[in-house]
Image: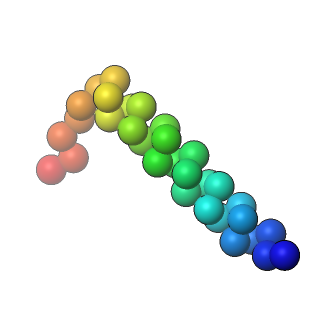
Amino acid sequence: MEVIAYVFILACLIGLFFFAIFFREKPVRIK
Protein backbone atom coordinates (compact mmCIF):
# COMPACT_ATOMS: atom_id res chain seq x y z
CA MET A 1 0.00 0.00 0.00
CA GLU A 2 1.38 3.39 -0.96
CA VAL A 3 0.59 5.64 1.96
CA ILE A 4 2.27 8.63 0.32
CA ALA A 5 0.03 8.38 -2.75
CA TYR A 6 -3.08 8.12 -0.55
CA VAL A 7 -2.08 11.15 1.52
CA PHE A 8 -1.26 13.09 -1.65
CA ILE A 9 -4.68 12.39 -3.19
CA LEU A 10 -6.43 13.21 0.09
CA ALA A 11 -4.53 16.50 0.37
CA CYS A 12 -5.45 17.39 -3.23
CA LEU A 13 -9.14 16.73 -2.58
CA ILE A 14 -9.13 18.80 0.61
CA GLY A 15 -7.24 21.60 -1.14
CA LEU A 16 -9.72 21.71 -4.02
CA PHE A 17 -12.62 21.63 -1.54
CA PHE A 18 -11.35 24.61 0.46
CA PHE A 19 -10.38 26.43 -2.74
CA ALA A 20 -13.93 26.04 -4.09
CA ILE A 21 -15.43 27.32 -0.82
CA PHE A 22 -13.04 30.28 -0.70
CA PHE A 23 -13.79 31.14 -4.33
CA ARG A 24 -17.56 30.99 -3.72
CA GLU A 25 -17.30 33.12 -0.58
CA LYS A 26 -14.93 35.73 -2.04
CA PRO A 27 -14.58 35.79 -5.83
CA VAL A 28 -11.04 37.16 -5.97
CA ARG A 29 -9.44 37.90 -9.31
CA ILE A 30 -6.05 36.18 -9.45
CA LYS A 31 -5.04 37.95 -12.66
Asked if residue 29 is positioned above or below residue 6 in the image, the reply reads above
Asked if residue 17 is positioned above or below residue 25 in the image, the reply reads below
Residue 2 at x, y percent in the picture: 79, 76
The image quarter containing residue 8 is bottom right
The image quarter containing residue 26 is top left
Colouring used for the render: rainbow
Using residue 6 as the reference point, say whether residue 1 is left or right of it. right
Asked if residue 14 is positioned above or below residue 9 in the image, the reply reads above
Residue lying farthest to the front in this orientation: 1
**Residue shown at 52% from the left, 48% from the top:** 15
Using residue 17 as the reference point, say whether residue 29 is left or right of it. left
Using residue 26 as the reference point, say whether residue 13 is left or right of it. right
Using residue 14 as the reference point, say whether residue 31 is left or right of it. left
**Residue shown at 24% from the left, 31% from the top:** 27
Residue 19 at x, y percent in the picture: 42, 41
**Residue shown at 34% from the left, 23% from the top:** 25
Residue 12 at x, y percent in the picture: 55, 57
Residue lying farthest to the top in this orientation: 25
Residue lying farthest to the left in this orientation: 31
Quarter holding the N terminus? bottom right
Residue lying farthest to the bottom in this orientation: 2
